Image (cartoon, rainbow, N blue to C red):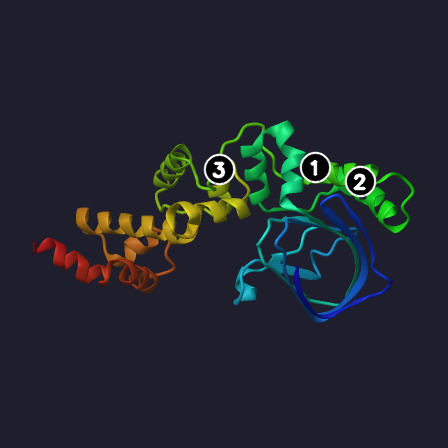
Amino acid sequence: MTCHTEGIRALAPVKWRGLDGLMSVFWDAEGQPGATGYYLSPDPRIVFFFNDVSSQIRMSNVGGGFERHSRPMTRAIYVPAGVPLWTNFTSMHRFSHLDLHVHKDRLLRFLSPSVGLSVAQSALRRPVEIQDVAAIEALAGLLVDEVSTPSKHAVYAESLVGSIVTGLLDIPEHDSEPANGRLTQAQMNKLVSRVDARGDCRLTVAEMAATVGLSESWFAHVFKQTTGKTPLQWQLGKRIDLARKLLLESDASVASIAAQLGFSDQAHLTKAFRQIAGETPAVWRRMQRIR
């Protein structure tokens, strides 16, 4: 695992225990204001915080432009293999957390007999971030006890890890996603229908994800795999298509079309329109009408 931190220090010796195909590590640490961390693991990783850190730590999976892409750290997160994680402390904070590094093959061996290989593979590719950890907090506490002072056979700690994994991962009752990590045609059709039904073609990424029954973070990933665009880039393209239609089929002013489609003003529409269509709305309309 690649790990770089600044401004974070352990307050007590780190406690760890190696098990079959996994490593459990317990930290009691403190982060200074502005402290940062970068983490990249070739294996799936689970981080569980024993206290609320949402107002002190922000996280992002996108390098550069941290402020634009960051969000509050939740009590428990699952980070798929190969997904980077950046963190930043907004204020001094003491925290305790459990790190679980589990080999992908170990997780597949654990999950596949119960849910099938395709569902297990889909679940392991899907990031998870939850704040309500009531369902797994007791399990995490029991595992820390076994990491700190082993008292039972290793199979006990391994079973606790398995229960935490199944309690945290987003495992559907039925596999609604193909194994290649793309949206199905049915999901895309459902999404297009809902966006088209809106007069301004605007939905939040959370609303788009809910439409196809996926978590927001996983939806953003598979949507780009499917379309080659981010959800907001794709949605902007739909809005510009609708602007073209209104420019051709009505005499509405560019300013009124901008307002109808939810752009902040005429200049905002003009800039977005030119980026996609190559001309300003007024010039494009004029060119189309003289053809």
User: According to the image, label 3 marks what residue?
Assistant: 179
> Which quarter of the picture shows residue 141?
top right
Answer few, some or many: residues within 10 Å of disc 2's Cα (few below 14, many 20 plus, some between 14 and 19): some
Marks 1 and 2: in contact by CB < 8 Å?
yes
> Which quarter of the picture shows residue 84?
bottom right
Q: Is residue 201 left or right of residue 248?
A: right
> Which quarter of the picture shows residue 107?
top right
From the image, which quarter does the N terminus lie in? bottom right
- Give whichever of discs 1 and 3 has the lower sequence position: 1
Describe the element under mark 2 as helix, strand or loop: helix
Describe the element under mark 3 as helix, strand or loop: loop
Q: Which mark is residue 167?
A: 1
Answer few, some or many: residues within 10 Å of disc 1's Cα (few below 14, many 20 plus, some between 14 and 19): some
Q: Where is residue 12 in the image (x, y as percent from the top left)?
A: 87, 63
- Give whichever of discs 2 and 1 has the lower sequence position: 2
State the residue at coordinates (55%, 42%): 215
Q: Which amino acid does label 2 sit on?
A: Leu
From the image, which quarter does the C terminus lie in? bottom left
* Mark 2–mark 1 distance (CA, rounded to whole Å): 10 Å
Q: Where is residue 37 in the image (x, y as percent from the top left)?
A: 67, 65
Q: Where is residue 78 in the image (x, y as percent from the top left)?
A: 65, 47
| Farthest residue, direction left | 291
Q: What residue type is labelled 3?
A: Ala
* Mark 1–mark 3 distance (CA, rounded to whole Å): 22 Å
User: According to the image, label 2 marks what residue?
Assistant: 139
